[in-house]
Amino acid sequence: MAKNRTAPDAMLLISTYLLLAIGVMMVYSASAVNAFHDYGDSYFYLKRQLIFAVLGIAAMHVTMNTDYWVWKRFSKIALIACFVLLLLVLIPGIGVVRGGARSWLGIGAFGIQPSEFMKLGMILFLACLFADRKQEITDFRKGLLPPLLLVGAAFGLIMLQPDLGTGAVLVGASFFVIFAAGARISHLAGLALVGAAGLIGLIIAAPYRLKRITAFMDPWQDPLGAGYQAIQSLYAIGPGKIFGLGLGMSRQKYSYLPEPQTDFIFSIIAEELGFIGGSFVLVLFMILVWKGMRTAIMAPDAFGSFLAVGITGIIAVQVVINIGVVIGMMPVTGITLPLISAGGSSLTLLLTGLGILLNISRYAR
């Protein structure tokens, strides 16, 4: 099999590097004002982004040049380690609270998010499981229920942080793999209904989530509270028009739009680079998803196919949720824009996953 290895998919690699370069540029543009105000250093977030981008690129090149089936033997260990990390982060004194969620392990400004590890770990395990037991997927009790329980357990631990956005990406990407493995549509439809009912229950159980839903319906009912982020995001997008205000010329980053370098960085892109710049970013993501799914279709074995579907699914679900929130089509939730938003473990692990996807593309038929 190694004799058939070719160069990685060029469009996939170029799209990744372009998105990463745009991300570094826009993180600096969006964060310079707040970074100077909070840390006395306009380059604070830029430095962090560059550090993690370099680490991520190094990891991507390692995984891009490591035969992907090697990871199959580590799938169980990786999943167990991810569950251990998710449990550790919930322990007071070990887990670090940021943004109202106990989602981090680390010291000071540097840390890791176990939920980010779980996204990749779960996809790796499911790809391995379904590749070995593909014939059982149509049997709900033997083939579908056990992996669903694992996904549900991971989702439950993430919700205890709480982090609904990351949990939604985990579940969405997992369903991509389950669908690709050949699960019955009737089973998936039933699970979708159960999931919708569960989501409604989670929203009702947490008052702040209910406020976000009402703010999504009409953010101007509470313009200084639950609707504030959505309104400020639209105030950023509107003035951008076709060509934007110009790179570095955003007005909303002056303490109007909270954390403009993370969840709402696409608002700053639309404000500074306009419809043209925002559309270019979306086209790059479309190419990334298209080439990822093409890699899955052309993969030489089931494991590579399912793994490619899952990694691509993580990106696709995350982009849809983030952009949906930014343009007011979804309730506000804490999801970053892949490769663009400021991030540490999220950026590094995503590039690691893309390296695996690029390696699979080297064996595409």
Image (cartoon, rainbow, N blue to C red):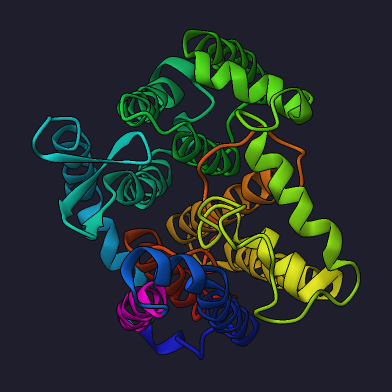
- Residue 60 belongs to magenta span: yes
Above or below for 35 versus 53: above
- Give the percent coordinates (x, y) of residue 170: 46, 40
Q: Does 91 appear above or below 61? A: above
Tell me residue 33's x, y (percent): 50, 70
Q: Nearer the viewer, residue 34 or 342?
A: 34
Q: Is residue 177 magenta?
A: no
Image quadrant where residue 182 sits: top right
Does the rendering let one see residue 219?
A: yes
Above or below for 116 versus 291: above
Is 137 displayed left or right of 272 in the figure?
left
Q: Main secondary structure of the magenta part?
A: helix
Q: What is the magenta range?
A: 43-63
In the image, farthest residue toward the right: 242
Q: Quadrant of the C terminus?
A: bottom right
| Residue ID at (47%, 9%) | 205
Q: Quadrant of the N terminus?
A: bottom left
Q: Residue at x 18, y 42 (%)?
A: 85
Q: Is residue 280 visible?
A: no
* Residue plotted at (71% across, 71% down): 281
Would you say 122 lies left or right of 297 here?
left
